[in-house]
Amino acid sequence: MNRRLLPLLAVFTLVTSGCAYLQQFLKTAFQQPSFRFKNLGLDGISLAGLTLDTIWELNNPNSVGLSLASIEYALSVEEKQVISGAPPQGLQIAPRAASDLHFPANLRFQDLAAVIDTFLDKDFASYRASGAIGVNTPIGVIRLPLATEGQFEVPKVPLVQFGNPRVTNVTFAGATIEFPLSVTNRNTYALPISGVSGNVSLAGANIGTLSTGDLGSMEGKGLKNVTLPLNVNFLSAASAGMAIARGGNAQVGFNAQVQSGGVGLPIKVDQLVNLLK
């Protein structure tokens, strides 16, 4: 062998064995990061849809930082595939720290059911998430699988009820009726209600329309009361005029819509009330 090559060969052998030793050392010293499902977040809830966010915790027990190399994620709701966002690749995970990874999906209920009312009739809806993330580490890319499934509470249309109306300003031609109306959020979370409006009937006669206006964001299990005046013309609603003159019990109907998140959903109230004078 050429004597000039011997030093180079010695250096090459030293470097090679050193790299092998370093690799073995890293494999021994490096601890596998843990990845687990943390919780489900619901945001932007209305009767039109919501944002469903699966939140995962990536824990790095090592003294060196890590970063995301790849992401595979699939989400289905009620066995229908939906599009979801994902954390950016290259996201840095600090040494000896845990980071939350969010996979938010904007759900529109009309995409999950032919008729929104059908979907909102459910108490709960099921979801399933699956996939994996790749993490850059000193010993190469590690693949960490993800999988979870569960249920989330489906928004419910608020409960609308009449109190006992009060009759005022009675004349031969008509009267004013003040309708107490209560709107109850039946959900455990806040729900925006931009209005409840519709046609009112009294004793079988159509007497006009009532509208609450914007009720804002109603807190979970919250109640809002409004009193809405309505002028009744006896000439166009004779049976209502008779009920008002008689007083006591009368049947009130309310064919209305609840507005929330840009959609209007029908409600029907048929209630026996006591006309107060």
Image (spheres, rainbow, N blue to C red):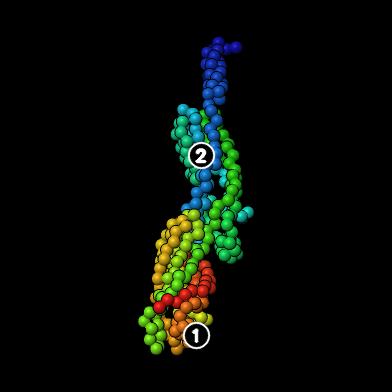
Q: Provide residue 32's location: percent of width, then percent of height.
A: 55, 30
The residue drawn where x is 54% and y is 34% is: 34
The residue drawn where x is 45% and y is 63% is: 193
Residue labelled with disc 1 = 239
Residue labelled with disc 2 = 57
Q: Nearer the viewer, residue 236 or 155?
A: 236
Q: Nearer the viewer, residue 221 or 271?
A: 271
Q: Nearer the viewer, residue 9 or 199?
A: 199
Q: Amino acid at mark 1?
A: Ser
| Picture mark count | 2
- Which of the 4 quarters of the picture holds residue 37? top right
Q: Provide residue 223's location: percent of width, then percent of height.
A: 44, 61
Quick one: SS at disc 1?
helix
Counting other residues with Cα less than 10 Å from the Cα at mark 1, is it few (<14), some (14-19), or many (20 or more)?
A: some
Q: Is residue 61 above or below residue 228?
A: above
Pair 2/1: label in front: 1
- Which of the 4 quarters of the picture holds residue 82? bottom right
Q: Is residue 211 left or right of residue 142?
A: left
Residue farthest along the right direction in this orientation: 79
Between the residue at mark 2 and the residue at mark 1, the CA separation in whole angstroms equals 66 Å
Q: Is residue 60 above or below residue 82?
A: above
